[in-house]
Amino acid sequence: MSKYSDKTSIGGSKDSFQTTHWSEIFDAGTEDHVRRNTIIDALLGRYWKPVYCYIRRKGYDNEQAKDLTQAFFHEIVINSKLIRQADQMKGRFRTFLLTALNHYLIDVHRSEKAKKHMPQGGFVALEGGNLSHLTTRHAGMTPDQVFNYVWATEVIDRVITQVKKDCSNTGKETHWNVFYSKILAPIMDNRTSPSLKELCDRYGIENEAKASNMIITIKRCFRRVLEDYLRRFVRTDLDIEDEINELLETISAGRAG
Amino acid sequence: MNPEQLRRLFHIGRNTNRSARKKNRTHQKADMLSRSLSQPLPLDKSQVAMLPSALGQLCHSIGLLAGETISELLSNPSTDIAAIKRIKHYSKELSAQAKSTAENDVAIAIYYTSIAHALVFHDRRITRFSYKRLESSFRCLVKEKWISKDVSILLKAAGRYCKKKAGS
């Protein structure tokens, strides 16, 4: 019933949240090519969408944007200068990535560096085909806003997928169905929210209080999963709220745009 | 997903308790910054140690008598550049001794404020950071709610200064 299945080629298998984040990138100044490639693949798998959309918004065509996206992730791991240029004071992985991307495109513009750093054997296909559909919704946004907006969309997408998976793993399929029908579907599909009575009848739940508790349980799970996901990109737990606030500001800017 | 849908989905995951704690932390940091800025700059012990003991004693007395707070030194356009450099150095010590992220953030704020003072009032760059990077850092700090109004004004002025320099 949900459009959120676990099967997607984007961002890896989504089996669980991985742990690679920017502290690992700082450690990645290694000559170990296998390790490097693992990090590049992991970064590419998780973050290619906002990077690709940002580059498209900067005026590059589909093919250029795909190549530059991959070249950027090679560059970020190989070239420690990009890492140094990123202002660590800001302390967040998203901001770091955006700053590094901005520096990278300036370098590309100056020296056509993308060609110099093209990996041996060329690039692997990024989902293949034309990815223009990803960028059609961002008219009126700046490249930075596009990056953050796509980032926010990815965060929510991954959180919902993970919550569904957690429910499945812990035998809470009915919990998920109630939560999805009452909370998610009305938001995502612009449906009218069904009454608790309707949900009890639909899923064979004893009473409305129990259905209500199920929703509260999954809301808590949603919150925990969102925090677990964002925790990897911030310095301390208290910065999670800042990250959410910034993403909400970005979303508001997108709405205004 | 459209922006409204995204906004509503993020709100499901918001932790109101964390939000309240965040507000508290902002107040705590604002207090911490205010306390740090209201302290006089400590005497530079390494310099005093180099002087004969009698002269050192005199310097110590003068140092204590001078007693201008860091805030006063930073807000006074005529503060000597050497004193501003000492504040910058002192902020590095504070950062090295910081026991929490909040303490470190406050030390960083003082560090950048001293650089801002040197730029705005002395037309001097007392760091190797580029104007572009400085402008970005000033902009980042100004956004923080715990930064006091006086400091914020100085940082904004320094940001404009750097933007102009970076563009020229």
Image (cartoon, grey):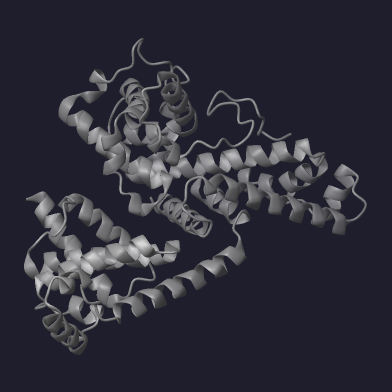
Q: Is residue A35 above or below residue A80?
A: above
**Outermost residue, bottom direction?**
B65
Residue at 23% across, 72% down: B153
Residue B102 quadrant: bottom left
| Foreground of the two, A109 or B61 | B61
Q: How many marks?
A: 0
Residue at 27% across, 32% down: A59
| Foreground of the two, A149 or B61 | B61
Quadrant where the N terminus of chain A sits is top right
Residue B126 relative to residue A99: left or right: left
The x, y position of residue A172, in whole percent, is: 81, 42
Residue at 27% across, 20% down: A117
Residue A72 relative to residue A23: left or right: left
Residue B79 quadrant: bottom left
The x, y position of residue A7, in whole percent, is: 64, 25
**Outermost residue, right direction?**
A206
The x, y position of residue A152, in whole percent, is: 49, 45
The x, y position of residue A126, in whole percent, is: 44, 20
**Outermost residue, top direction?**
A121
| Foreground of the two, A131 or B145 | B145
For the question of whether residue B143 can be seen, the reply is: no
For the question of whether residue B40 can be seen, the reply is: yes
Residue at 58% across, 56% down: B11
Q: Is residue A255 above or below residue A64?
A: below
Residue A25 quadrant: top left
